[in-house]
Image (tube, rainbow, N blue to C red):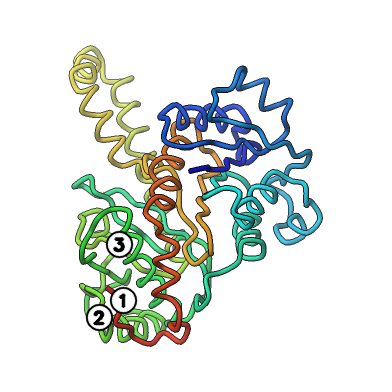
Amino acid sequence: MKIAVDAMGGDNAPGQIVRGALQAAAEGRMEVVLVGQEDKIKAVAGDLPGNVSIHHCPEVIENEDKPLMAIRRKRKASLVIALNLVKDGAVDAVVSAGNTGAFMAGASLLVGRIPGVGKPALAPVLPTVDGKGVVAVDLGSTMDPRPENLYQYAIMGNLYSQTVFGHKSPRIGLLNVGVEAEKGNDLAKKAHVLLQQSSLNFVGNVEARDVMQGICDVLVCDGFVGNVLLKSMEGVAQAIFAGIKESVKTGGVKAKLGAVLLKDSLKSFKDQLDYSQHGGAPLLGINGVCVKCHGSADASTVKNAVLKQAYLLAQNQAIAKIAKVMEGNSSGENSAGDR
């Protein structure tokens, strides 16, 4: 198996990106292709192991670049080349922490959508108190989907949960403002009807406060609401640990002693709340394994994105399974292959 890593994408590129890719490659399960400016990659990587290579390309898509324009004009950019490697079958997956808009636009234009899929969707794994996590789809790809798109998100999330996490019959929840079927806006109400009529294991509406309780395996929502949920969870986690740190700093000897005694427990709790432990978010609905990391991804995040997302998705042929089920489902009709 061969996985391309966009070495020039992200706030911490190429240093942290390359280091994370090398850490993943050290596991020995795959070949890693570092895509980017060769001189800058070598300056960070040094001597490369036998299962790591460099695919040189001179250009870089910056965060401030307009996505579509960048994809069309910067054809020798690391992100564009990496996506083309997936399209051409030269690699089995791509991982990037670069410009999110360009990544999504490039994946749709270059790699292409799975036939029957109306809109692609970002599907990261959000933390839950039981440590298992919940696949959330969509968390930022499509801001104004139709009910049929949410239904398709549920189908793709269901298959993703089955193939990667081993859930035989994933519990599908719909993010809403109340658990009652009649709650929510028009989009939520219509999506609820489609999901309730499907053969999916639909457990109904889920309120945001209950997401981390692990009451569903797949959480369905539109990209706007989903992204707000994600950023809110990030902000709360950051505030909690900043508050703990400040309390220890100003709490005197007893607080410092308590912090020492609780150090391992606090670290475990922090890791449990950190969605980056899963590495990144696959862009479901694209005809290839495309995984997006947070723009601030560090080496650990990139390593996890390669090992826990890209590798498992490719190994379990998740895209082929999704494509098989999605064929003929473009109108949101129920299918015997939903489960």
Confirm or deny contact between disc 2 and disc 1 (CB under 8 A). Answer: yes
Residue 221 screen position, x and y as percent: 39, 69
**Label 2, label 1: how many angstroms apart (C-alpha)?**
6 Å
What residue is drawn where x is 41% and y is 84%?
332
What residue is drawn where x is 72% and y is 29%?
38
Q: Which mark is residue 208?
A: 3
**Label 2, label 3: how many angstroms apart (C-alpha)?**
24 Å
Q: Quadrant of residue 252?
A: top left
Residue indicated by mark 2: 199
Tally of numbered discs:
3
**Amino acid tagged 1:** Asp
Nearer the observer: mark 2 or 3; the answer is 2
Q: Which mark is residue 168?
A: none
Left or right for 100, reference 232:
right
Instruction: Indicate which disc, 3 or 1, sits on the residue closer to the N terminus.
Output: 3
Confirm or deny contact between disc 3 and disc 1 (CB under 8 A). Answer: no
Q: Quadrant of residue 180?
A: bottom left
> Disc 2 on helix, strand or loop?
loop
Instruction: Indicate which disc, 2 or 3, sits on the residue closer to the N terminus.
Output: 2
Residue indicated by mark 1: 338
